[in-house]
Amino acid sequence: MLQLLLHNLQSNKQRIKRVHFIVPQFTPFLPHYSLFSSVPVHPSRRSSPSAIKPTNIHPIPINFRGIAKDVMPDCSYLFDCSSGETLAISSLKYFIFRLYCISPETVRRFWRVHPLKPQDVLEILLGFQCVSNNFWLEAEKIESLWGIFRRASQQSKGFVHLSQSYKIMASMLIRAGMFEDVECLLSMATSQEVLFDNHEIFSNLIQGYVGERHLEKAVASYDRMRILGLVPSLSCYELLLKFLVQLNVTQLAPQIFADAITLGMGRTVAQGHIYGSVVRLLCADGKVQDARNLVKKVLTLGIKPSNLVLNAMVTAYCEKRDYDDILSFFVEVRCIPSVHVANKIIHSLCTYLGSQCANSFRLRLEELGFSSNEITLGILIGWSCREGKIKDAFIYFNEILSRRLKPQVYSYDALLSGLFKQGMWKHSQEILYEMKESTDGLQLSTLMVLLAGLCKARQFEEVKAVVFEMADCGFIQPTPLEDPLSKVFTLLGLCPTAVKIRRDSELGYSEAEFYDNLGNGLYLDTDLEKYEAAMTKVLDDAMLPDFKSQILKSIQSKSIKETVIMVGNMVNWGQELCLPLFSTLAKGFCEGCANLKTVIHLFEENPKFNYHQLDHETLNTLAQTFGKKGLVQRARIIVNGMLLRRQNVENRTHTILLIGLCNKGDGRALANYWHVAQKYNWFPDIKDGKTLLHCLCRHGFHGKALELFEAMLVHHPHKDFGCFNELLEQLCAFGFTNTAHVLLKTLADRGYNPDHMSYDLLVCSFCKEKKFSKALLICETMLAKNFTLPLEASVLLIQWLCRNGNIGKAVFLKDSFSREQPSALLYVHRALIHGLCQSGAVGKASSLYKELHMHGLSHDKEVYNSLAQGYAKAKNFKKIGELLGVMTRRDMDLTAASYRNLLSLMFAESKLCLALSLKKLVISQNNLPPTLIYNILIFRMFSADKVSFLNTILHEIQSKGLPLEEVSNNFLIQGFSQCKDVTSSLQYLKDMMQKGLRPNNRSLREVIKCLCCNGELEKAFNLSEEMELRGWKLGSVIQNALVEGLLARGKLSEAVQLMDRVELKDLIPGNINYDVLIKRFCQHGEVDKAVDLLNIMLKKGNNSPPDSSSYDYIIQCFCSHDLLDQALDFHAEMLCRSHTANKNTWSALVQCLCRGRRVAEAETLLDTMVQMGETPSREMYSAVINGYRFENNSIKASQVLHRIQQDGYEPDFNTHWALICNLSSSSGKNKSEGFLSRFLSDVGFSRNNPNAKKG
């Protein structure tokens, strides 16, 4: 027992420091008045800001798994609920309702269709075939149509969709990227034995799979298509082949390309890069003969091999050293290779068979029409010099000159090296002379050759001359005391101290190797073998350009431009990049921040190197570079290939791709790749995770953000609580504070104790969103945890509490905050004074001001302005005068709000002189802009209908040279309109428009409304036409006024034309309300236009949907025209929208049904009324009874008669007598029974009633 106790003590040592966070939660507090009565808090328990410490270290490990899943149900409005389980359990009516909001006219007639027939489904699909520009609306539409398609087929066992419905639905699903649903659709078609033979759908499906990088599904769809005998589209072939080439699928690409040729698309497909890529794939796989056969097959289509094709073939033949086959290939395809391709062959021949064989091949190429350039001959010069055939080299050099070509520097260097190696150094001067004549100057490479050659020839005087020339050219910077020869030996890779030139002593055996100008014998005191090897190496290296070392050097120096030039030169000279060099280049370009076009061009110009040949490090660098630059698809190609080859994809690569997809806003692609990344154990580090979190929150992918946050907590449980606050901050910044709050509560339920900053973020964000009640609840939690409330939120909460009459809590909050943060005393007092003044408690505010004065903080401009507004609200002119006097003496200015409130009071009390004096005072303070002062004055004048001084004010504004800006003009227009001075308001409106200013909607609305009310319809229409020309929206009031004016003059057709024109020009605002116009058009019998307006309101999806009265008028209008089905459709829609029809609407429907001999439906309507709590009228019952009577259905009629009596109505005599007559003329089952007894029995009387009165 003792050992166990000691063990527990030891294990809890680390928790002792955290006791001060735990104890307050279990220690009872002394009773004290709290902001929230349920939380008594002692003032001594308040924590100061310095005492607040993060509580993100927990004594007990917290299980963070499943947090995202717990949060999502409480925030389902933020996440995608349009797929998965929600759609699986949704009813047919649910999907129809979703579509109804998109196109009500298409869906309307199906409210009453139960069950749907195959033709009905087709009609719905045809009605929604048009593509919407709104991505989210289009996705919702297609998901709803798919839901209807599936639900309809489940209505009955024998339901079979029409084949056209399958085709339309499939094309829509493909357009939305719902490929799994397409597969489900195809399975449905197969099970119902529906022939699915639409090549366009399959082609689009293949292209969709390619876009999603699903190789197997794309190929499977292609196979299924070919089995059905369908021909893919040209774009499908091109995209699929390009995809196969990118993934280096050697077997499939040639087969599908050959298939395209067989189907007659070869000519078009072979004109792009795909043809060359397919040939390259075959060649890379060693199938050169197959590639050659493919080229010949394409040649029969009249398409000659491109340079890419020839390059691929030549590369393959050169690797096999089948040079004769190359020549025969050129003869067979009747093509002349480009210089680049020919140089590659010449370089390969020189490498393996020597320069003479290469020249023979060149001559045979020229017989075919090839023309050698200076580089072709330069290759032969270099190899001839390397082989010691200096004579041949000069022959090739002479050929360059004879063709009037300009020799390359590399050719000069090769010739000089050859001469020096042959000991013909004296002829080097002739080459130098020729070189200086034809080039801009000697290059460093040439000077190095001269140094090595002259040193080899022991011409050290000439060496010194070359050194001086190098210094003049800026290639070297020798010091005055430095020996030139020492510098030379250093440049040539020798140690200068190890090479000495000594004079021969001429005693005994002579050691002289060379002589100076004076005839003195000299010799080298060094390791001659090493010396000669160094000179020879320099000369040998100069015979053929070493582009590899130059490229590596330029990559190390981050010189992208120079590297690109070197790579181009390497290709021109017939040399090929090796895989390590290519990999270094690709990685160097990415790390050197090269233009992406450079990286892409590198791969295009070297098609033999694919992504699959590079190492994973280079591929990760490439993918990250493409992803950062927005080329997400290219990055995905790389990553998909890596995953197929099981190469290591770095977490950072996955993260960058997810950020790229997130920035594109493609939620479906993001979800797909998210799944792929998780499958391969992706997890970002802290820095990248925070970046991705920010991106996900910014684009509204909150579900993924929560999943990522959960993963970060699980992987870094002791590091990521800073990340938690950052996630809260991101959610709050983008207006999703509710989600942040739910997340915090979920974590708290798991045992995490959020720190002070977490609560600060939520409180401040809720206050900014004006959700003060929620902010107050969080404040309760903060006070319970002894956290100090944030100042910004406290100020806002104090004012809100005052506005809502909770002055006691506001005062307590002020007192509590003042004790905890004395430095914030002024701010909370200021907030409370302002809140008290706004709530009308200016007396309490004045007392609080005195308290502030005791603390020496009374000289505050905002406090005085708050008091001024409070006294204005209390209409206390005496206090206002005293306060203004104090403010003037203390040089305090009135704010715009105070000036506005004081003016309002003065105009309301008819103290115009005081108002004008106040205006002068405010202008003299130079605190507010003069235009603002006059604008407030003008607005208050019009509001109080005190415009007697208006002309004086306007003249004063003009005399001061102040312009009437946009706000001023709008106030004048609206004010004159209120005063019924339409002429003045119209004049200011025209002046404003002539100045290029746009009047606000209220100004336009008021002027047009006044013009229409005054009967000046022509002026109103002129103004509306001007608005149309400028593309300004016409709001509800404007349209109502114009149409009402036209209808009042009997111009119904003009009113309809006006509404058509407004709709055609898209001048309808989003918050339009047509309830009034719907009523008017129905009253004038124009029900079609009324329906159009109703549809517009529904499509706009605004916050003011059509009123039930609009439906009532439309239904009654249809009934008056005996358009019964349309009326019933709108009635069903009305009920589905939870609207209640009025009695007149019910009556009109019942009467119309009875007139149309559809009495049973009329009785059903009566039943519906009763179920909805409505009581049918006697007229409705009578209409149904009469309808049954005309049908000679006395039983039904008598049943309805019984119902009318149960509802307390007394049937009239005519109804009774008509039924009695019908019963008397009809033959009952018991003919012996009298008709009256049968009638009484049918209406509910017992035949043997013992309680019946006799008499």
Image (cartoon, rainbow, N blue to C red):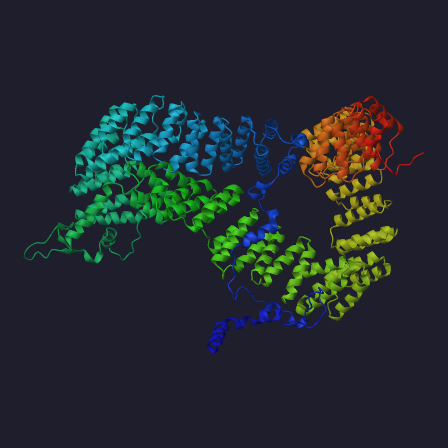
Q: Is residue 25 above or below residue 1189?
A: below
Asked if residue 892 can be seen in this view, the reply is: no
Nearer to me, 228 or 723: 228
Q: Is residue 513 above or below residue 885?
A: above
Task: Give x and y (percent) for residue 389.
Answer: 17, 36
The residue shown at (46%, 55%) is 685
Q: Is residue 40 above or below residue 1250?
A: below
The residue shown at (49%, 45%) is 660
Residue 303, by quadrant, is top left
Tell me: 599 left or right of 180. left
Nearer to me, 65 or 205: 65
Residue 639, by quadrant, is top left
Task: Give x and y (percent) for residue 1178.
Answer: 84, 33
Residue furthest out toward the right: 1255
Residue furthest out toward the front: 1232
Tell me: 365 left or right of 1069. left
Nearer to me, 580 or 712: 712
Q: Tell me the quarter of the image containing the C terminus.
A: top right
Task: Give x and y (percent) for residue 939.
Answer: 80, 46
Task: Give x and y (percent) for residue 586.
Answer: 37, 44
The residue shown at (24%, 34%) is 320
